Amino acid sequence: MSGLRGSSSTNPSSARSTLTTPGALKPPMVRTLTPPPSPNQRRYYEGDGKHKEEHERWKGERDNNGNTSTTIGLGGSSNMDVTPAQNAFEALEDTVKRQAIRIQSLEQDVKTLNTTLESFIDNFNALRASLKQPHDRYPDTESLNVHPKFQWTLEEPDDNNSVEGTPRRRSHSQVTPTSSTRTSSPASKASGSSTIGRSNHADLDPKTLKHRVTNHDLTATVIRGALQKHHVNNASEDDYVLSISYDVEDGRVERCLSWDEKPLAVFEAFKAKSKDPVFKLALAKDRPSPRRLARKAARLLDKSTSGAGSTANDLPAQTSVETTQTATPAPQIEDGPLPKAEGYGLAIHPYDAPREGEFSVAPGDMFIILSRENPKWMTVQRDTDGKGICTRASVKAVIPAGCVLETSVPLAAAMTEARSSYGTHNSTTLVGASVSVVPPVLPSSIVSKATKGVALKDFRGAKVNKDDEELELMKDDVVHVYKKYHHWVYVIKENGDRGWVPSWHVGKLCIPKES
């Protein structure tokens, strides 16, 4: 009996003979160390002798297969099949598994709450923008900040929201913002954050769009990806415009991307040149035409002059950028030969003369060009009847060259030619296309340099305000692009119809037209 305790059972036959010797005492409980008994095997440790014999037979078969085990006599009761330590370990393992499942469920709940919060902030800002009224119960929009990768900002004042300046000033100078003007936090740009709102300006980080778009996708696809990322699901890409700003020698330039461009490829090209490109997404209605901006500037000027307590002796009761009577020099009759015309000009953009010796310009004004001080400045006479006749009594003054289109013939003759040929060109016009209210001028009569372009999408109907000399376009219309101002371009169709259209609706076709 003593020899059996603590011995190593290496011979299955000897172990069986020892355990089944007649008259021997009840053998102690034997436990296998490797491998531990399974629940189906534990029942052989208890019960009658038949089960014990089956257990011993199983041990022998295992040892015959080359597996050796060490048995230790435990003595005492035979009910010690599972120790308390094993029970505690199994209970701890079950607890850890349950905790892991609960953590996964909590992570999913956090993601759902984050999505709901972003949607709420989106709807809240859209409601605030539509009301256009502050409310004391709610904080300002700037205070609604969530994760640093999703910060909200209001639209920054545009550098081009002003009437085109004279050559003596920086072109497209910025309108001085009022004290109530709110700007976005500079931290958003520094962190490269992605910001967007239904009616707000937004900076977009291309890294956040990598899973949605590629370098080969066009502008419409990039806009859709940005809207989907920020959960703006009820909007169309046609209602938005994507622009890119980048560094130049004297500051930064912003350019709207046309529908046929590949934004990410453009971004990578500017990034390779260390120009610090930034995408900006805004509503198309927040990019007004130059004529609309001119009226806005006139209203701001009227408010500033009326608020300063001016009288009738100081300034006119109303100052408009479209008036042609302000800042007009006194008539100067000169002896000698009559001035010779170097060309003729048709005003397409308003200009308010700030000093003596300059003409105020309104769209549609006609001029006789006498000389050019430099490419940005010209001396002219007014041509009230469009016949191009110079007189000594006519007043001479200077105007910005960017406000006019130069023609090779007097404007009256150019418009007559366009009207006479309009019927031929209009025979191919689609039914329902409206006729422009602006007198037509054929591209062949214009000597200003231009590029040929093509309409990428329809620009018509409610989107067009003809009072602002905006021009309707049908997709695939061929146009001549002459001027560009504040993300809009001045174009003329082959039939002479002319006006302003958004620059992102026009794609390039060829090199500039020969003069």
Image (cartoon, rainbow, N blue to C red):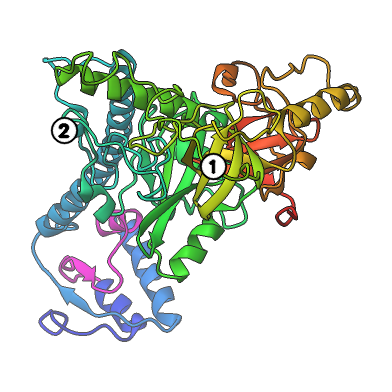
Q: In which quarter of the image is the C terminus?
A: bottom right
Residue 28 within the segment the image draws in magenta: yes
> Which contiguous range is marked in magenta?
21-47
Q: In which quarter of the image is the N terminus?
A: bottom left
Nearest the eye: 299 or 213:
299
Report x, y in % for residue 324: 46, 24
Mark 1 neighbour class, 10 Å CA radius: few under 14, some 14 to 19, many 20 or more: few
Q: Is residue 435 above or below residue 10?
A: above
Residue 402 within the segment the image draws in magenta: no
Nearest the eye: 342 or 333:
333
Q: Are marks 1 and 2 in contact (CB under 8 Å)?
A: no
Nearest the eye: 374 or 30:
374
What's under tag 2, amino acid-wise?
Ser
- For disc 2, the marked residue is 143
Q: Pick out the residue farthest to the front.
A: 335
- For disc 1, the marked residue is 335
Report x, y in % for residue 221: 58, 43
Q: Is residue 71 visible?
A: yes
Q: Can residue 277 be seen in this view?
A: no
Foreground tag (1 vs 2): 1
Q: In this view, does 62 lie above or below 384?
A: below
Label 1 and label 2: CA atoms lie apart by: 69 Å
Report x, y in % for residue 226: 46, 41
* Location of residue 6 by image quarter: bottom left
- Indicate the secondary structure of the residue bearing disc 2: helix
Mark 2 neighbour class, 10 Å CA radius: few under 14, some 14 to 19, many 20 or more: few
What's under tag 1, amino acid-wise?
Asp
| Labels in figure, total | 2
Q: Is residue 322 left or right of residue 51?
A: right
